[in-house]
Image (tube, rainbow, N blue to C red):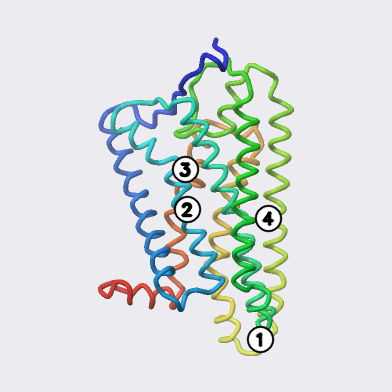
């Protein structure tokens, strides 16, 4: 038994118990991490360098890529280093920083995906007012609101989590520092805090879902009023990447944080954490670039040998 004052480091979950599997884990995570770095880095560079892409949609996409880079960089490098050097430890301050950064970046991504659904709503349902409703100043304010709200949310969760006395050891059942895992180490009654965390997270998540669903209901109605089938397909195809990314993000977040405790298990928690922390940052660039001809054209100008 120990208290929080004596905890100077945490033990992360070891994903492998043999040297061969540890190295396999390292190379697997390295491949995913490099794919995320390359994909998001190309999107950021392409949008920043091509003035034709300086529009609200691509401004939000650039911010999304920055958040994806940050979120995967907050967790994966430490896990890779531990596997490479056969370690499990992370310092107390490092764990607190990891919790803050991950919650901050994931929260900002949630807000940003909501604003991106509003961008698609205005572009399709109110095209004549697009420049007025989504001018450059408005977009900057929306992005600042996403980052600022996420900062406050992360500060609240981190302060709430690390103010608890810890006396259930220092071993975490996850490959990175996660709020639910740290709450399990507390020696105080964390029921009310867990309920409060669940309620607050549910309120934010379902608020984002409601706004996004409402936006897409209006989009569907506008698309169905287009007389030609080709016109309907072309208009709706601009929403498909965002819809896929939102579905992937929300589904994994719901499973991770809002699943009933009765179905929770270490293996399920590990799989779900992998899905929502690593898969979206690696897949988002591919999803957005596959059906976006403007982005493909800009990328081919930036890198002439790109086979697209």
Q: Earlier in the sequence, mark 4 or mark 2?
A: 2
Q: Which residue is mark 1?
A: 226
Earlier-in-chain disc, 3 versus 2: 2
For label 3, count other residues whose C-alpha is less than 10 Å away and answer few (under 14), some (14-19) or many (20+). Answer: some
Left or right: where 167 falls relative to 212 = left
Q: Which residue is mark 2?
A: 68
Give the residue displayed 41% in from the left and 65% down from the top: 43
Residue underneath mark 3: 274
Between 76 and 261, the one lying in front of the other is 76
Distance from disc 4 to disc 1, alpha carbons, whole Å, reads 28 Å
Residue 24 position in % (x across, y down): 29, 38
Mark 3 or mark 2, which is nearer to you?
Answer: 2
Instruction: Give the mark toward the camera: 3 or 4.
Output: 4
Distance CA(mark 1)–CA(mark 3) = 41 Å
Residue that mark 4 sits on: 208
Furthest-bottom residue in this view: 227
């Amino acid at each position: 038994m120990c208290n929080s004052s004596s905890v100077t480091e945490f033990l992360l979950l070891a994903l492998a118990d043999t040297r061969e599997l540890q190295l396999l884990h390292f190379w697997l995570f390295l491949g995913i991490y490099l794919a995320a770095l390359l994909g998001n880095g190309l999107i950021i560079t392409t949008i920043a360098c091509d003035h034709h892409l300086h529009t609200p949609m691509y401004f939000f996409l650039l911010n999304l890529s920055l958040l994806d880079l940050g979120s995967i960089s907050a967790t994966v490098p430490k896990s890779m280093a531990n596997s490479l050097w056969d370690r499990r430890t992370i310092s107390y301050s490092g764990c607190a920083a990891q919790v803050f950064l991950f919650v901050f970046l994931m929260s900002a991504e949630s807000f940003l995906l909501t604003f991106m659904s509003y961008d698609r709503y205005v572009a399709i349902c109110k095209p004549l007012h697009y420049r007025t409703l989504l001018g450059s100043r408005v977009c900057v304010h929306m992005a600042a609101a996403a980052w600022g709200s996420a900062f406050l949310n992360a500060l609240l969760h981190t302060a709430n989590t690390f103010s608890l006395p810890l006396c259930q050891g220092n071993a975490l059942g996850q490959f990175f520092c996660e709020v639910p895992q740290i709450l399990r180490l507390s020696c105080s009654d964390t029921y009310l805090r867990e309920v409060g965390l669940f309620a607050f997270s549910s309120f934010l998540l379902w608020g984002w879902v409601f706004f996004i669903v409402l936006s897409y209901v209006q989009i569907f109605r506008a698309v169905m009023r287009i007389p030609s089938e080709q016109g309907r397909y072309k208009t709706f195809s601009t929403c498909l990447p965002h819809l896929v990314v939102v579905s992937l993000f929300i589904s994994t977040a719901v499973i991770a944080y809002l699943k009933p405790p009765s179905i929770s298990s270490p293996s399920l928690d590990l799989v779900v954490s992998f899905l929502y922390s690593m898969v979206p940052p690696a897949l988002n660039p591919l999803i957005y670039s596959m059906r976006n001809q403007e982005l493909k054209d800009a990328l081919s100008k930036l890198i002439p040998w790109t086979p697209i």
